[in-house]
Image (cartoon, grey):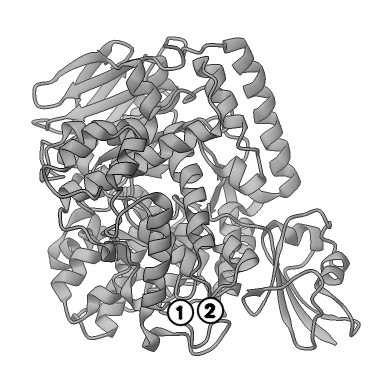
């Protein structure tokens, strides 16, 4: 399946990209994706799909747009 | 009494006199400093109903017991007065070397009264105060003013000044520091201007009193290094606050086109990555090891220091997606001494009102060149449009009528910061109940709301989170006084702050003691609001009405068809009041006021309005 991944803030310096379309296995979860793009598991983050948070164990679907962001606190 | 100098410098510009006063240990323990000192002083000393831009108002610079000490991010001052924008207590904080210098001069607070008979610069050096003519810098912008002061005094002094916005009484004029920082969104710079006070220069030569100077030095130095290490690990300050823009865009929380839209396909053009790529310098406050000022060149070649709020409100909110053009607007705000957030909302409201047919005009979204000219007109109050803009969104809407009040983006007169709450109920509550108007400083709960709650929820957990954050952000960090960024962005533990406080004062306070002070401050700001507006109602704590309007709901994207619901918002507000111990108007009950030791203040407030038992 194809998923568009957007990486936000300083996490782009971990992943090396800020937006990319990835070809993923059908069973890929949010946790798998975050690991695959190089973000350390201990790094606090919020992952959203269409503006709503998703859980690490949630499965991705073909055509999803996923955003991975640090936990911002609004300055 | 250790930790505090115990001194207030009171300056009367009318008579060109000054005196050094002392304050009691009870005052210090009850109000600690910063926002606490400021609100207590203004509540006690200002008569209700005075003109905020008249000589009876007082301009305050207030510091705390760890101010100016080399510990993480203690270079912040609170500036306060009765606000000409909102009509009651207003304040803000800014990083400035004036903090350390004022403390070394022997003061925890500066109170400026009266009105000078000509443009004046105050020069404070320890026990000496000089009232110097400021004709050479009156009419000049803050950068030129700083250059002039540099040339006279060198870079070691602390400086606070205003630009043309403050001089011409623009109601959202700020106070600026030599370090390029600004504070006092609710027009505190205009209060300086109303007193013909162009600048304050301060130099101190004495040690700052501390109960355990050796312990503080050891802890402060180590912690400054550690905060820097944490920041390097997180990478936060690479983009600093500008990094939050794409997050807001993704979750449909970005202000676009006067908050009409919540996201935009071109927003990436002004995001943190692009701002950092355009960076030519980095600015920071004194005693900071995670400097947040992303400085770029504007269209005209000036250095312009960006953060998220000004990028969003002077960029996408005006449908400007060009970094140099957006940076030009930001530079002009800094040069004129205008609040970037209120300026962005005021310009966007003007464009929206023209769009909606509420007023005739020639300004359109996306027109950066006209926006620059409008900022100049506002800062100088030139012509009818300049006067209108200089008064901020609420007064503009009252002048325009035709339903424009609904999309004049303010709460209690203070313009909304850069988070679009069209469908973020908890953050809308945060704006609604922020004690001085719609400031983002008091509580920011968007990430919590989206990650840990149902976005649609109006439940008590959101009210509880707002209160938790208010106690920390609007309480602790504003009275102690320090920058919240090490804690909030890089996880520096909060326990460090009672540690610094105790090393400075010799007391043994914990965080619970700090929350009590914060609650006391919030309650007294509420009493000041009630005293100025005896007809205060819960509707004063509602966010801009356009967020409740189904016709304003997004037509596509993550929150298509969604909007805030007024009945549910009112229920969320009630959760907040119940948890705070406030009555149905949002005013602290007598029981709450007694628990906070505010019996005297309550007795005063009762002369003007009823309090609920």
Task: Give coordinates of residue B411: x percent, y percent.
Answer: 31, 62
- Say which residue label 2 marks: B264
**Does the rendering let one see residue B161?**
no
| Residue B601 visible at all | yes
- Between B123 and B609, the one nearer to me in the picture: B609
Residue drawn at x 77%, y 54% as measured from the top left: A43
Quarter of the image with the N terminus of chain B is top left
Left or right of residue B202, residue B555 in this image: right
Question: B476 or B576: which is nearer to us?
Answer: B576
- Is B203 or B353 nearer to us in this picture? B353
Q: Circle 2 sits in a helix, a strand or a loop, which is it?
A: loop
In the picture, measured across the screen, residue B337 lies left or right of residue B157, that is: left
Asked whether B382 or B519 is in front, the reply is B519
Residue B53 position within the rendered picture, expressed as x and y whole percent measured from the top left: 14, 44
Total number of numbered discs in the rendering: 2
Residue closest to the far front: B613
**Residue at 21 percent of width and 79 percent of height:** B361
In the depicted structure, whether residue B32 falls above or below residue B340: above
Distance from disc 2 to disc 1, alpha carbons, whole Å, reads 8 Å
How far across and down, in percent of the image, does residue B90 sit? 28, 45
Residue in the image at 37% along x and 14% along y: B106
The quarter of the picture where residue A28 lies is: bottom right
Provide the chain ID for the residue under circle 1. Answer: B
Q: How packed is label 1: few (under 14 Cα within 10 Å), some, or many (20 or more)?
A: many
- B197 relative position to B510: left or right: left
Q: Are marks 2 and 1 in contact (CB under 8 Å)?
A: yes
Read off the chain for label 2.
Answer: B
B362, above or below B543, in the image: below
Which residue is identified by label 1?
A: B261
């Amino acid at each position: 399946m194809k998923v568009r991944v957007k990486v936000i803030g300083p996490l782009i310096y971990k992943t090396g990209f800020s937006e990319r379309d990835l070809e993923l296995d059908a069973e890929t979860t949010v946790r798998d994706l975050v690991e695959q793009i190089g973000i350390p598991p201990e790094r606090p983050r919020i992952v959203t799909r269409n503006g709503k948070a998703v859980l690490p164990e949630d499965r991705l679907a073909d055509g999803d747009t996923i955003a991975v962001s640090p936990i911002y606190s609004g300055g | 009494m250790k930790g505090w100098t115990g001194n207030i410098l009171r300056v009367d510009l009318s008579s060109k006199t000054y005196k050094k006063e002392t304050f009691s240990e009870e005052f210090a323990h009850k109000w600690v400093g910063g926002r606490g000192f400021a609100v207590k002083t203004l509540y006690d000393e200002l008569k209700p109903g005075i003109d905020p831009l008249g000589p009876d108002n007082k301009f305050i610079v207030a510091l705390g017991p760890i101010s100016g000490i080399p510990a993480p991010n203690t270079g912040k001052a609170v500036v306060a007065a009765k606000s000409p924008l909102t009509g009651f207590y207003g304040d803000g904080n800014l990083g400035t070397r004036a903090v350390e210098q004022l403390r070394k001069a022997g003061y925890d607070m500066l109170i400026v009264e009266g009105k000078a008979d000509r443009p004046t610069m105050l020069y404070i050096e320890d026990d000496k105060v000089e009232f110097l003519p400021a004709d050479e810098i009156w009419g000049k912008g803050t950068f030129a003013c700083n250059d002039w002061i540099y040339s006279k005094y060198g870079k070691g002094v602390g400086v606070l000044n205003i630009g043309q916005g403050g001089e011409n009484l623009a109601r959202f004029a700020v106070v600026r520091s030599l370090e390029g920082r600004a504070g006092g969104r609710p027009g505190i710079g205009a209060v300086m201007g109303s007193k013909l006070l162009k600048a304050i220069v301060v130099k101190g030569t004495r040690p700052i009193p501390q109960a355990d100077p050796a312990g503080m030095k050891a802890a402060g130095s180590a912690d400054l290094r550690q905060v820097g290490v944490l920041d390097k690990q997180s990478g936060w300050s690479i983009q600093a606050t500008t990094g939050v823009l794409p997050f807001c865009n993704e979750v449909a929380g970005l202000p676009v086109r006067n908050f009409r839209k919540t996201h935009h396909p071109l927003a990436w053009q002004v995001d943190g990555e692009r701002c950092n790529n355009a960076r030519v310098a980095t600015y920071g406050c004194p005693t900071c090891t995670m400097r947040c000022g992303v400085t770029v060149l504007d269209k005209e070649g000036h250095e312009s220091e960006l953060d998220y709020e000004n990028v969003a409100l002077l960029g996408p909110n005006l449908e400007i997606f060009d970094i140099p053009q957006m940076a030009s607007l930001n530079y002009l705000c800094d040069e004129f001494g205008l609040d970037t957030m209120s300026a962005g909302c005021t310009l966007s409201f003007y464009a929206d009102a023209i769009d909606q047919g509420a007023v005739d005009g020639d300004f359109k979204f996306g027109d950066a060149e006209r926006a620059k000219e409008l900022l100049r007109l506002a800062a100088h109050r030139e012509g009818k449009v300049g006067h209108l803009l200089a008064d901020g969104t609420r007064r503009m809407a009252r002048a325009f009528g035709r339903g424009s009040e609904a999309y004049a983006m303010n709460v209690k007169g203070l313009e909304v910061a850069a988070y679009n709450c069209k469908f973020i109920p908890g953050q809308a509550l945060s704006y609604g109940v922020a004690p001085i108007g719609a400031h983002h400083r008091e509580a920011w709960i968007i990430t919590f709301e989206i990650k840990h709650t149902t976005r649609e929820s109006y439940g008590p957990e959101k009210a509880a989170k707002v209160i938790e954050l208010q106690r920390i952000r609007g309480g602790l960090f504003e009275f102690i006084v320090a920058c919240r960024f090490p804690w909030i962005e890089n996880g520096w533990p909060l326990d460090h702050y009672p540690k610094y406080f105790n090393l400075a004062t010799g007391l043994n306070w914990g965080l619970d003691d700090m929350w009590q002070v914060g609650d006391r401050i919030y309650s007294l700001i509420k009493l000041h609001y009630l005293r100025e507006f005896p007809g205060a109602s819960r509707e004063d704590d509602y966010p801009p009405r356009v967020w409740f309007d189904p016709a304003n709901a997004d037509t596509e994207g993550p929150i298509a068809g969604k909007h805030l619901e007024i009945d549910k918002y009112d229920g969320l507000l009630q959760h907040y009041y119940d948890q705070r111990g406030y009555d149905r108007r949002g005013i602290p009950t007598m029981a709450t006021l007694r628990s906070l030791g505010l019996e005297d203040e309550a007795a005063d407030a009762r002369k003007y309005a009823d309090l609920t038992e």
